[in-house]
Amino acid sequence: MTAPGAISKVCTALKAYWTGGTWLRWEVFLGAVLVADLVLNAVVSPYFLDPLTLSDATFNFTEKALIALPMALLIIGREIDVSVAGILALSSVVMGLGAEHGLGTPALVGLGLTTGAACGAANGALVALLRVPSIVATIGTMSLFRGVAAGVLGDRVLKNYPASFHWFGQGYVIGVISFELVLFTVCVGLFSIYLHLTLFGRRLYALGSNPEAARFAGVRLTRYRFWLFVATGLASGLAAVLLTSRLGSTRPSIAQGWELEVISMVILGGVSVAGGRGTIPGVALAAVLLGFVTYGLGLANIPGIVMQIIVGALLIVVVGLPIVGKRLQARAHR
Amino acid sequence: MPTALRRARREFGLATLTLALFAVVALRFPDFASGRSLLSLVDDTALLVLLALGETLVILTRAIDLSMAANVAFSGMIVALLNRAHPDLSLWVLVPLSASIGALLGTFNGLLVWLLEVPSIVVTLGTMAIYRGAVYLASGGTWVTSGQMSASFQGLVRHLLLGVTTLSWLALLGALLAWWLLRFTNAGRGFYVAGNNPAAAVYAGVDVGRAQARAFALAGAIAGLCGYLWVARFAVAYTDVANGFELQVIAACVIGGISIGGGVGTVAGVVLGCLFLGVLKNALPLLGVSPFWQTALSGLVITVAVIINARDATPGRRRILEPRTLAQAGTPGARPSP
Amino acid sequence: MRASGLAKAFGGTRALIDGELSLYAGTVTALIGENGAGKSTLVKILTGIYRPDAGQINLDGRPIQIHSLLEAQQLGISVIHQESVVFEDLSVAENIFITARPKRYGLIDWPGLRRRAAQLLAQLETPLDPDALLRSLSLSQRHIVQIARALSHDSRVIIMDEPTAALSHHETEDLLAIVRRLRDAGHAILFISHKFDEIMAIADRYAVFRDGAAVGCGAMADTNLDSLVSLMVGRAMAQIYPKLPASPGAEILQVQGLSRAPEFQDVNLTLKRGEILGVYGLVGAGRSELMQVLFGLHRADHGQILLDGKPVHFANPEEAIRAGIVYVPEDRQHQGAVLSQSIRDNIALPNLRQLSSCGITRNSRVTAAAGEWSARLQVKCRDTGQRVDELSGGNQQKVVLAKWLLSKPRILILDEPTKGIDIGSKAAVHQLTGELVQQGLSVIMVSSELPEILGVADRVLVMRRGLARGLFERSTASAPAILRAALDS
């Protein structure tokens, strides 16, 4: 094959790939934005490309991203959980109380995970068994969980965590690569396998696209919905372990506003709110992207609340742009 | 009119529940039922009522607005800043300005939902963050305190007419206007049509997107007005004004019988829902519940309310067998002949 | 009204090539044609949803342009759809006047609205409470609300699109009576239906469409069933209900005293290996509800189901599928297939276990299985990666069948399998079922089309109002006998 022939073949293949609508398109786009942002950050702050800085940046998103993974599955399944931050807060409070009573690190971790899973099960019971619409059910449980945490905590701060407990959130595995980052990467792998390779993932996509037809095809809707909520609760509990150990304390305001950041990660990752569409690599990329964007903004001394403006605008633009693009395309074809 | 009465069953239930709760507290604390206490209760709940009415319009069209509280904060901050800088600026300018800013923010939401067809939950998640951040930008992180606000600015909401505060009268007026809009105008009925069956709405001459945009604009205007009312009533304006309040608003709507799927709900229901939450909130300190537990309790109430809503909405079994047959066999689910 | 030379194309598909139609006041004109013949496109042009690429429409001799639904309404053209265009949580009265609520002093006049609604309902001799919410009404009552809506606009042309599709016999009679009343009042009615017995009973004129063009019209009195069908199909009436020879074996399924109040009660039935058991009944007789219990979607209150002599309890469809019982539901679009997914994904969905190893689904196996069955059922598509909502109704049904046949079931339950499908695909479905039955599959076929039941079933179970009313062998099954069992009170 001649060189120009090969090049034209590659070009046609690329063009077909780009316009063919295969699922990698969005992920490639996100990847490109991520690279652009990394470059921008490096330009704005010369210290950015230092390995220690980059590792520091990962703490910005790993905990939220861990929750975003099962949340993505939930939203693909046409449900939503806005109570994750409340679950996190409650798990943290339970762990703090356990620490005050002198429990060791393994017991504390167990407490945190169990609380998270139990809260998730409560959500699951409401949505899967009692058929309450998930948005209102989790708005209710969000207040409930956060409220119980606040009620139990009062105005104190729980700080008496054992020294070994701090490793989860502050420890490193190899060099500058933190435990949190390793855990995140492992989870991305596991969730990707679940959603994209196993039969359970396929059933989930069908459930999200048309729950009725999925039910008639033998998919156990109640079971899927229930366990998805448990998984999200468990992930929130795990994030509670990581965050609490990183901060070293439990305050009533812990993880305030995190539910929206997690949901933003998922939606930015290409998951449709209508259900039935989305990928784990996309969500992972979106999590990393948001993490680096907010970290870079922090390095440039932009206050958190202004960062929210950028995240909010990003969310709208990212969801709106493809729709506008489709409309313009349709108009051009007429 | 048996049908109408049957439909008001839910409102009756809620009213009874509210009165029962009220009675329980009043029995132990007779002061709770005093005129002054009642007026204070209404005044406390007025802002919730106004915002819930706005949110209702949006939810009726099968959308949701999470940005109302941020809208309140922004509009309130702007007029507070203006008042601090120009104390002689008349309220006749400031109050409509506040509402207009709110309307603008609401219209922005509405246009994104209508023209760009972005799901409302995504739009308002985004604008919630944007508007809240804008408050910070506008104020530079500073607070506008009561000392910096003019007397007339703060005074209007507290002014008493026939012993009732202006704020309370506004809430009443708002409820009446909302009732009039939803019951007697085609635009109002259009909200119900759009939310009930969006696919078929075109056959009824209703453009769902446009109805939603209208609802968002109105909700925004109400939020804008509440911006002024809020900062004036609490005599302070800062970035975190009304933070998290949107959830109380949605809770009031849900308790009041507004279906999250759209097309169902009444003004009376929403007002009752607000009153219920108001009584609860004022009763808790009296009942010795520490303020730290209040969120938990209202969360519990919301959860119970949505469970009840869900039970109402579940479709039952299809009625095929003739009542005669059922009665003969005495099978479960048998009902006597109508 | 007279439409001539109407044409409409969508991209490369020419939906309508030469649409011609004349409607006269005080006449019922039947619009006949297979699916895809251009009927619905024509209706959408007449009601302003589509703009024609060519041709013109004259009303009272003057040319008109219809740009929108509202404009069509103002010109006096109304349409009543198959799927109710109603608003469930609004009252009957409001639904009737949904586009034009009467006003007094600028406010909606609710008492006046109620009064006018009651008047219209009285005109139609239907005692409905104007304040009742739509969601409490049956399908036929909802149709009547739509008719009242058409009357409220002073419509001169009323188009009815398959209005009796899901109605019981009694409800159909009531509806046809209303249609006659409307005709006698001077309205022009365009009646679209697949049911020839109704057409013969109600229509004064006919108009037949085939492949996007009008192929014939005239007075009903001057024609007969055979010539109508041959006009519609373009060839002599083919064998629609082929009956392949079969020899049923032993009983594999027994249902004893099955009850689920208030849906059905005390139903007994048996199914033999290699037979087609037809279940006939009017719409709403409880047949689908019974089948859904057999499939594990719902639980029965009393009675038992025996498979190969052993009692079984299915808590969910997955268990039924594992036992070899599968169900093709009536509502293809919402329950039968996941329209937004590909043919491949739909076929794979209930069979994922056999297409996976250790939980990982093998794409190669999926594509192979989907390709094999898609070819065997002759699904017309680009490839198995095509989305199901791009296929025609008949091909969608084939995909639904394919996904179940892949699971090698023992009992196939079909619920109105040929509803809304063109004649060619109908014949294909029956041919296929016949072949499978010859190979040992047992079929339960629920249908409300008597010719279909009489043509294909080995035995016929008749249900009425939730009760089993009669069991007929093929030799003793006749239209009058079955109808009597289905209608007797």
Image (cartoon, grey):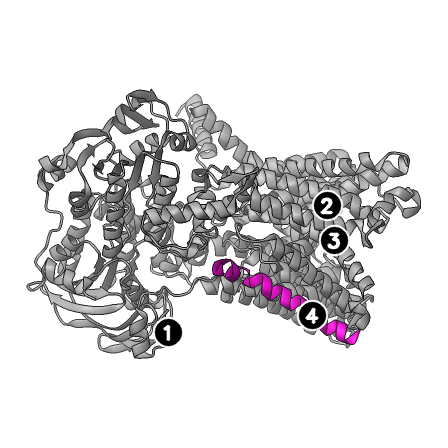
Q: Chain of mark 1?
A: B
Q: CA distance from mark 2 to mark 4?
A: 32 Å
Other residues around mark 4 within 10 Å, as few (<14) / some (14–19) / many (≥20): some
Q: Is residue B256 above or below residue B208?
A: below
Return the residue at label 4. B21
Return the residue at label 3. B46
Q: Nearer the viewer, mark 1 or mark 4?
A: 1
* Residue located at (84% from left, 45% from top): B156
- SS class of the residue under badge 1? loop
Residue type at mark 2?
Ala
Q: CA distance from mark 3 to mark 4?
A: 19 Å
Q: Where is residue A285 drawn, in percent x and y?
A: 60, 45
Q: How many marks?
A: 4
Callouts 1 and 4 on one subunit: yes
Q: Nearer the viewer, mark 2 or mark 1?
A: 1
Query: Who is closer to the viewer here, B308 or C473?
Result: B308
Provide the residue span drawn in magenta: B1-29
Other residues around mark 2 within 10 Å, as few (<14) / some (14–19) / many (≥20): many
Residue type at mark 4?
Leu
Return the residue at label 1. B336
Query: Who is closer to the viewer here, B49 or C99?
Result: C99
Horizontal placement of C110 versus A177: left or right?
left
Q: Where is residue C102 drawn, in percent x and y?
A: 49, 40
Horizontal placement of C267 versus A252: left or right?
left
Q: Are marks 1 and 4 in contact (CB under 8 Å)?
A: no
Asked if one can make out residue B64 in the rendered structure from this viewpoint, the answer is: no
Residue type at mark 3?
Ala
Q: Which one is earlier in the sequence, the residue at label 3 or at label 4?
A: 4
Horizontal placement of B265 versus C303: left or right?
right
- SS class of the residue under badge 3? helix
